[in-house]
């Protein structure tokens, strides 16, 4: 076939197709180079004719139960044009044993997770043929199952200082009256109702200003609160000498200072619960307005002492929603819309540890997309990431959490793509993942990357397949600020791509040009996967902007580190 004609066909297909498709595809630098080649009439130096390489085992999209050896088998022979003898065959860097009849085999070790097996055959004249295919190895589990320690987080002493600054306004802004309504009456004296008793219900707790301090210590947080302009309205029901009565009352105080240790502990799906122990309370400028209430009842209820216990309790109660947001993002939505499907997220803290440097938090998590209840995913064992509570903040996201969600989307067909293309020998492109994308550690450097294994791209002419290629890619993970810096989101970076044209190619394009066309299909799949990853609820700290973000990996976790502004 005429290479220039093939280039013109491909350039016309990409540049003169439907506008949306044209905009989508012309972002690739590969297209610009190809179009320029057709327009200028220049051609790159012809590639050296490669040997003929065929892999017979393992099949594409192999799922293996656990790590271990995999034997790669195939055949290799000189190309028809040069008959240059084959010098070597390498499988992931392991030299294969090649027989006189061209059969070969090599055994490579497969780690848990996603592995790309790359076979390279080289001949004496420098011709090179390659084949890349994917293997998933690990424990097959049901989608939607809870993952232990799916999220880990650390907050430094400095981070809690930042939290303290927003805790006071946050407490003041809560509807405390509504929070304590189920606990009424909060003051009881004399038993009753009978001939002599008093019950006082607190209607609200208001304050002009409140300053909170939270300092990590062994086992919890040193808690301090200074409240000015305290205003506590309420009402009393009582009886004296068997005569019932009811009246409004109001407690005010110029200033109340609270100290103690705030204990924080896991409370299942409700998040964290708090308890204030070793309380110290100082009350200044106390005043009780209770006209109409008999003195006997006033003495019984002792509202000054009651307020010294009620206000610390209310302050402790108000800390729970703030700490749930700060330590686990548990106050956020539990159901999300993802690609038109309902994603249900269940989070429960598993552990929390405090020392003077800060706090370490572990959380279990389960995620299920509606309709994917029967889906399976590959679980890989995680280690324990190194968490340093003395510096800013760190968040560890287990790769299994994302892999579970992506596998569900794959099972529901959400990663299947169909795109029109006009002006070439094919007018349609269908993309299907033989395996779900998987986040896995790169054996070369240990960094976590997204692996797209054996993505099959089929080119059709009016619905009839006329070309097929397998695309394998690894894509760097990136972390970007979201919500104006108040949260972070997982993003996908630059891909590294390997394309193999399969047996079917009736497109009138060379295998090389079809490989280039196949790479363009990757952009649509990256966009799809990004839609999934951005919905992973990475913890955010309410009211604090994140800065100096960096991403790494450790023991099967995507690690995000940074500082708070």
Image (cartoon, grey):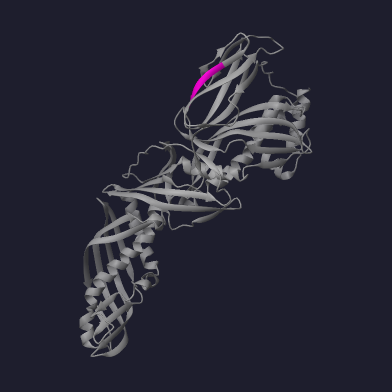
- Residue 439: x and y in percent read 50, 37
Seen from the viewer's position, the closer of residues 149 and 247 is 149
Which residue does the image show at 26% across and 77% down from the upper left? 188
Residue 205: in magenta span: no
Q: Quadrant of residue 384?
A: top left
Marks counted in the figure total: 0
- Residue 540: x and y in percent read 43, 52
Residues drawn in magenta: 105-110
> Could you tell me if residue 422 is visible in this image?
yes
Which residue does the image show at 38% across and 51% down from the upper left? 349
Seen from the viewer's position, the closer of residues 337 and 58 is 58
On-image quarter of the N terminus? top right
Seen from the viewer's position, the closer of residues 168 and 489 is 489
Left or right of 73? Residue 209 is: left
- Residue 153: x and y in percent read 38, 46
> Could you tell me if residue 27 is visible in this image?
no
44, above or below 101, in the image: below
Q: Quadrant of residue 505?
A: top right
- Residue 356: x and y in percent read 26, 48
Which residue does the image show at 31% across and 44% down from the upper left? 390
362, above or below 503, in the image: below
Q: Quadrant of residue 429?
A: top right
Left or right of 268? Residue 229 is: left
Residue 108: in magenta span: yes
- Predominant secondary structure in magenta? strand
5, above or below 21, in the image: above
252, above or below 28, in the image: below
Left or right of 221? Residue 413 is: right
């Amino acid at each position: 076939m005429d290479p220039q004609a093939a280039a013109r066909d491909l350039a016309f297909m990409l540049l003169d197709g439907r506008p949306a498709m044209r905009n989508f595809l012309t972002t690739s630098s590969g297209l610009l180079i190809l179009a320029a080649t057709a327009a200028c009439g220049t051609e790159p130096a012809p590639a050296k004719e490669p040997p003929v390489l065929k892999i017979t085992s393992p099949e594409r999209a192999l799922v293996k139960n656990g790590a271990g050896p995999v034997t790669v088998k195939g055949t290799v022979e000189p190309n028809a044009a040069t008959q240059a003898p084959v010098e070597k065959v390498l499988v992931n860097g392991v030299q294969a044993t090649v027989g006189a009849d061209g059969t070969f085999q090599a055994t490579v070790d497969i780690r848990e997770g996603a592995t790309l097996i790359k076979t390279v055959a080289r001949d004496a004249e420098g011709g090179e043929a390659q084949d890349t295919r994917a293997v998933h190895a690990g424990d097959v589990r049901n989608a939607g199952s809870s993952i232990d320690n799916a999220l880990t987080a650390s907050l430094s002493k400095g981070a809690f200082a930042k939290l303290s600054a927003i805790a006071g306004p946050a407490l003041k802004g809560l509807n405390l009256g509504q929070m304590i309504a189920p606990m009424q009456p909060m003051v009881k004296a004399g038993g009753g109702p009978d001939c002599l008793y008093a019950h006082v219900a607190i209607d609200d707790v208001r304050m002009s200003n409140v300053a909170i301090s939270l300092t990590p210590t062994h086992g919890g947080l040193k808690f301090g609160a200074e409240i000015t302009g305290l205003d506590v309205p309420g009402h009393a029901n009582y009886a004296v000498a068997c005569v019932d009565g009811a009246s409004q009352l109001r407690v005010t105080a110029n200033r109340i200072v609270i100290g103690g240790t705030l204990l924080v502990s896991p409370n299942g799906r409700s998040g964290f619960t708090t308890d204030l122990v070793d309380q110290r309370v100082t009350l200044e400028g106390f005043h009780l307005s209770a006209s109409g209430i008999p003195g006997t009842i006033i003495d019984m209820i002792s509202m000054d002492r009651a307020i010294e216990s009620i206000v610390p309790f209310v302050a402790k109660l108000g800390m729970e929603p703030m700490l749930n947001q700060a330590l686990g993002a548990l106050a956020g939505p539990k159901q999300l819309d993802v690609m038109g499907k309902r994603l249900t997220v269940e989070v429960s803290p598993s552990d929390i540890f405090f020392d003077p440097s800060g706090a370490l938090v572990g959380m279990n998590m389960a995620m299920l997309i509606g309709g994917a209840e029967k889906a399976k995913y590959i679980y890989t064992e995680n280690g324990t990431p190194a968490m340093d509570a003395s510096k800013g903040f760190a968040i560890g996201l287990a790769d299994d959490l994302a892999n579970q969600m992506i596998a569900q989307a794959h099972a529901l067909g959400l990663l299947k793509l169909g795109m029109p293309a006009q002006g070439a020998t094919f007018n349609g492109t269908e993309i299907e993942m033989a395996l779900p994308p998987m986040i896995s550690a790169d054996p070369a450097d240990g960094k976590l990357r997204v692996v797209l294994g054996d993505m099959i791209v089929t080119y059709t002419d009016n619905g009839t397949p006329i070309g097929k290629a397998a695309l394998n890619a690894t894509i760097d993970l990136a972390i970007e600020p979201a919500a104006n810096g108040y949260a972070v989101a997982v993003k996908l970076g630059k891909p590294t791509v390997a394309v193999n044209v399969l047996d079917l190619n009736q497109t009138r394009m060379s295998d090389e040009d079809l490989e280039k066309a196949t790479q363009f299909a990757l952009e649509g799949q990256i966009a799809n996967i990004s839609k999934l990853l951005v919905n992973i609820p990475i913890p955010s700290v309410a009211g604090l902007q994140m800065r100096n973000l960096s991403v790494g990996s450790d023991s099967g976790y995507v690690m995000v580190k940074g500082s708070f502004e």
